[in-house]
Amino acid sequence: MRKAGKKSVDEDFRSLIDMAEASHNERMIKNAVKSFAKACGFERFAYLQTEGAEVKTFNSYPRPWEGVYLANRYARIDPVVTEAKRRMDMFAWTADDWPDRGSSELRQFRDKAVEHGICSGVTIPVEGSYGSTVMLTLASSERKSEVPRLRDARKATQAVMAIHYCLKIVGAASVVAPRQALSPREGRCLMWAMKGKSVPEIAMITGINARTVQHYLDSARRKFEAKTIPQLVAIAKDRGLF
């Protein structure tokens, strides 16, 4: 077994981002995040996006727990979600720290979470667009409150955003014709172009060579029969791709 260290952790982050960007569907993304969670010593993961009262989730939690969570709108009272929005920084948690007194609803939430094996974990929150919050939780059935290998908050944030954008790209691919379907990296570069970023800026953000970024944008432009990158961006916005 390899020793936990900076190099091995960096490899896990890099592997997650590479696997996510190479994914063509949600199943592949889920497998990538599950492998990352396991490498970090956790059994399950949950990606959650909250915007006002709206909650979107993508996870490997037991289906019964996901159903109960959404049906009861537990994101309203979930201590992990509350803490994530308050701190906006990576933190470890354990169900043992959750209040066992107070409202019966909160006690019921805690009992059901533990019953389904959600006992401890680490959560990485990131501020999303339009007032939304995006977070990735790695969870364990063990009652512990430590982050055994995750120490680099910057890389953790980068990993969460990679998952976030890859899910958006996969979702967008379902609303365009097959000949127009973008590759994960074409979609990622286009998404940053839609946010007003230049080719050098996209290269710096994504870690992709500027010439390669231009190649991906040109490829996307040809797929949508756009003559220029601004026209490509306009078409993408008009069709509500992202």
Image: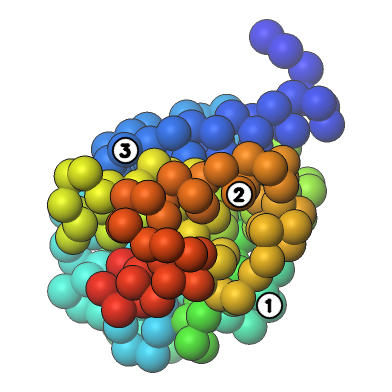
Residue 123 found in image quarter = bottom right
Q: Position of residue 92 (x, y in %)?
A: 65, 57
Q: Nearer the viewer, mark 2 or mark 1?
A: 2
Q: Is residue 223 visible?
A: yes
Name the one closer to the observer, 1 or 48: 48
Kind of residue sitting beneath label 1: Arg
Residue drawn at (31%, 57%) of the image = 224
| Residue 174 found in image quarter | bottom left
Residue type (three-letter) at the residue carrying disc 3 = His
Q: Residue at x 69, y 27 (%)?
A: 11
- Residue 87's mark? 1
Q: Residue furthest top?
A: 1
The residue beneath circle 2 is 214
Which image quadrant for residue 239? bottom left
- Nearer the observer, 143 or 183: 183
Mark 2–mark 1 distance (CA, rounded to whole Å): 37 Å
Q: Is residue 90 above or below residue 109?
A: above
Q: Secondary structure at mark 1?
A: helix
Of residues 83 and 96, the one drawn nearer to the viewer in this rendering: 83
Q: Is residue 147 above or below residue 24?
A: below
* Amino acid carrying mark 2 in the image: Gln
Q: Residues within 10 Å of mark 3 (few under 14, many from 20)?
A: some
